[in-house]
Image (spheres, grey):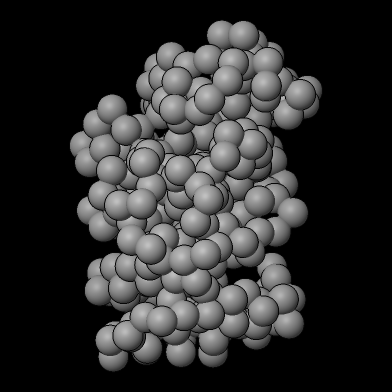
Amino acid sequence: MTPTTFRLNPIAIGGLGGSGTRLIAGILARSGCYIGQELNHSLDNLWFTLLLRRQSWFRDFPPDQDIRTAIRLFRIAMVSGLGNHSFTSDEKEILEQTTQEITRMKAQSPKRLQTVADSLRNSQSTDCRSYARWGWKEPNTHIFLPYLADIIPGLKYVHVVRNGLDMAFSDNQNQLKNWGRYILGPEFSKTPSASQKLDFWIVANLRAIQTGREKLGNNLFVLDYDELCTMPEKTLPALLGFLETPGTADKYTDLISPVSLGRHKSEDCSFLSEKQKQSVAFIHSQISH
């Protein structure tokens, strides 16, 4: 099986942790997209997680070549399988590194990740033969968007955004802990305040949106998750059009659950600077409709 077997563009879903990417993955899967055979309860593609969300990369962001090799392996596994692939020395090294890091990945059990690693190495084209398109969901996708856009032809990307002030008071700050030094530079603190959490939200989202506009053009869709949940009749048709999904919006509305909004209203937001307010407003002005 070759990538040309797929009739529709590959599609990726990413965003900051807690942004609501699971819902979009559910819509994509129901539409008939192959999103992988190794998924967790949040529908994260664990092949992507294993190859690209690594403990050692949190400490020192890797060389471009390592990222590109990992992405190429991921793409081959998804579209034609690695079971019969002739590995280059670089590819063998990357796979060996992922195996060595399994015990360090605290968010997943080593036994489960070893199963994921085995399925990655033994993947076959039959895994996705009956699908018209392939794609994946993994929140950390936006970190590697500049590379993904270059390596995966025709890639479409949905970047999910939630209210920045609400996210500043969210307990889900794994991406900040993992990538904070890379995204924020020397300003990063291991015990971030609400202000720095918001700064990370701003810089990470701006980076993803600007990269998407430059490298993907019309193949970028910036989704307001809160708006999707509160006004699905407005947002869902536009998203489905971008995803090129069959059927009407009512095929997917049962996947949408009410969300808690306005968390920040009960918090002290006196830290907000004028620059932060302007940045939050600008990001929300980039929402696709």
Residue at 41%, 60% in the rendered image: 79
The picture quadrant where one finds residue 268 is: top right
The picture quadrant where one finds residue 257 is: top right
Q: Is residue 193 above or below residue 49?
A: above
Residue at 50%, 71% in the rendered image: 124
Judge whether residue 190 can be spotted in this image: no
Judge whether residue 242 can be spotted in this image: yes
Q: Is residue 65 above or below residue 223?
A: below
Instruction: Name the foreground residue: 20 vs 272.
Output: 20
Q: Is residue 205 above or below residue 181?
A: above
Is 264 situated left or right of 205 in this image?
Answer: right
Q: Position of residue 6 (x, y in %)?
A: 38, 47
The picture quadrant where one finds residue 154 is: top left
State the quadrant of the C terminus. Answer: top left
Is 211 situated left or right of 277 in this image?
Answer: left
Residue at 33%, 67% in the rendered image: 72
